[in-house]
Amino acid sequence: MTDLTKVGMADMNTVYSPGILTTLGLGSCVGICLYDSSTKISGLVHVMLPSSEQIKNNSNTAKFADTGIVKLMEDMLKMGAKRSRIVSKIAGGSQMFNFNDTSDIMRIGTRNVAATKETLRMLNIPLIAEDTGGNYGRTIELYSETGILLIKTIGYGMKQI
């Protein structure tokens, strides 16, 4: 049985193959998976908020899309991943509750996905697959041996991307 490394909310981790990274209960949060197919070095960050710039208590880099992805990539490079080979897959960003108020402040899932994509674009990390949006939670597992991202949901089954 391969080692399963859990990543909590506002947390990140990296593994060498054949490790598996998992995070539970992605609602409006986004799970960002980075993967180097040559070294099979893999990373996962579970971000809660789009930007560290709007919050005073922003010391936890893993909490924010803008800082979490950068730190995760740096950790993978230290392990031997090559920046030019890193690709990404993302999941989460649900709208878990319906609000009568249509203000952006309540659309945290949508904002998390947008901030994630913008940060990946700025870092020139290709986004090769995503399972985002909807109104349901997801649990994900990233398999470093293959780069497959397994997405488990309640009521919507399982799928691989």
Image (tube, rainbow, N blue to C red):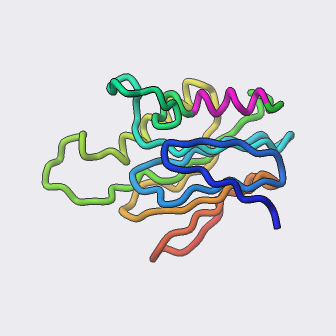
User: Horizontally, is 45 left or right of 92 in the view?
Assistant: right
Q: Position of residue 14 (x, y in %)?
A: 71, 42
Q: How many marks?
A: 0
Q: Quadrant of residue 141?
A: bottom right
The answer to whether residue 159 is above or below residue 133 is: below
Q: Position of residue 124 (x, y in %)?
A: 63, 27
Residue nearer the viewer, 126 or 140: 140
On whether residue 26 falls in the magenta region, the answer is no
Residue nearer the viewer, 66 or 134: 66
User: Horizontally, is 137 left or right of 38 in the view?
Assistant: left
Query: Residue at position x 77%, y 51% from top?
Result: 144
The residue most toward the right is 38
Q: Position of residue 118 (x, y in %)?
A: 48, 31
The answer to whether residue 80 is above or below residue 100 is: above
Check the picture and name the quadrant holding the N terminus.
bottom right
Check the picture and name the quadrant holding the C terminus.
bottom right
Q: Position of residue 44 (x, y in %)?
A: 63, 45
Query: Residue at position x 49%, y 42% from top?
Result: 10
Query: Residue at position x 74%, y 52% from top?
Result: 147
Q: Main secondary structure of the magenta part?
A: helix
Q: Report the magenta residues as a range.
A: 69-78
The answer to whether residue 63 is above or below residue 160 is: above
Query: Residue at position x 77%, y 27% from top?
Result: 78
Q: Quadrant of residue 50?
A: top left
The residue most toward the left is 100
On whether residue 76 falls in the magenta region, the answer is yes
User: Horizontally, is 74 left or right of 23 in the view?
Assistant: right
